[in-house]
Image (cartoon, rainbow, N blue to C red):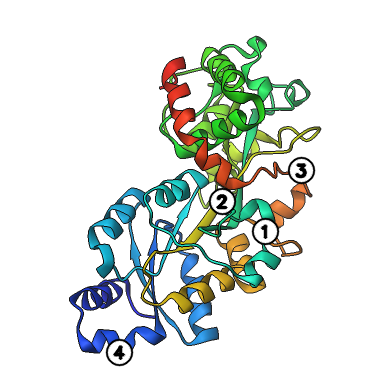
Amino acid sequence: MMTKARLTLSIAAILAGSAVASSALANELNLYSARHYDSDERLYDAFTEETGIEVNILEGDSDQLIERIQREGVASPADVMMTVDAGRLWRAEDEGIFQNVESDVLNERLPESMRHPDGQWFGFSQRARVIFYNRENFDPSQITSYEDLADPQFEGQVCIRSSNNIYNQSLLASMIEHHGEEGAEEWAQGVVDNMARDPEGGDTDQIRGVASGECDIAVANHYYYVRLLKSDDDADREAARQVGIIFPNQDGRGTHVNVGGAGVVEGAPNRDNAVRFLEYLASDTAQEIFASGNNEFPVVEGIKKDPVLESWGDFEKDNVNISILGENNPEAIRIFDRVGWR
């Protein structure tokens, strides 16, 4: 596998439009990725081994990649853009980054909820946004749903990230879908009223806040907890042992899940390779790498999960189409502003 530096040079060569670069396109795929997990290298290596197609990777955050593709215009070498969260995928879609893809393989392998209705992008891994509680100070039977987070009995007990966090934006977008804008705003105001502190830090900090007793309950993506549990740091593992996990809304619509996903870029010079790469991401091999590499839930049924995830058993997932989370994102941001969720 080529190094990252060399991959960047490869993309630069394509941008230069040289005859040599053009002749090499048939056996290449240019991937713009906002995922920064070392385990994803296994995905690319396995794809190359299976197909002979070299993967050239350009990394950055989602907004940077969107801006770059727009700036490059019709000369962009980008074949696939990969990122996390439906909100970010929607932003790319809204900026005209993706093209429609029709694939029998993807339609058969992926649940309908994980496919954009027009094939603009697809979800290949799932991350559950769950509730954590302090094992010593909190009775988990008190809370069974996201809606409970707004109950006045939990005033001063909730830790959660800021409103500019895309994970929270998508959670609120799901509340809009299920309760309407008015109901979602009422919920958001209730959560603000119940915060133990002003929002700060990332998901791991929310879990640590529960472990330390700064708050009794918190919201975070499941894999941050698994990272703590598997950490080489004794303090991290102890923090994980101090908290329990709740999968909300099991007696109703199910737990909110988001995605790691990808789509084929409009004007992709290697479109066939790009579609083949997306189909590969839905394969058993790739799904197992997603599941083991970043402790994410596979999208395809029957894939072996990480042992920690296996120990949790099956749980009911909210099957709202992930495209809805993106469509509701602008209103979610407006609601956050109105209720003063920093």
Tell me the SS state at disc 4.
Answer: helix
Label 1 crowd (10 A; few <14 / some 14-19 / many >=20): many
Checking the image for residue 306, the label placed there is 1
Tell me the SS state at disc 1.
Answer: loop
Say if 167 sits above or below 299 in the image. above
Amino acid under disc 3: Glu
Checking the image for residue 259, the label placed there is 2
Label 4 crowd (10 A; few <14 / some 14-19 / many >=20): few
Tell me the SS state at disc 2.
Answer: strand
Tell me the SS state at disc 3.
Answer: loop
Checking the image for residue 23, the label placed there is 4
**Residue at x 75%, y 20% (from the top left corner):** 142
Residue ID for mark 3: 316
First in residue order: circle 3 vs circle 4: 4
Give percent across and percent down for residue 46.
53, 78
Q: Nearer the viewer, mark 2 or mark 4?
A: 4
**Residue at x 57%, y 41% (from the top left corner):** 324
- Residue 145: image quadrant is top right
Q: Nearer the viewer, residue 101 or 306?
A: 101
Residues under labels 3 and 2: Cα distance? 16 Å
**Residue at x 45%, y 20% (from the top left corner):** 341
Label 2 crowd (10 A; few <14 / some 14-19 / many >=20): many
First in residue order: circle 1 vs circle 4: 4
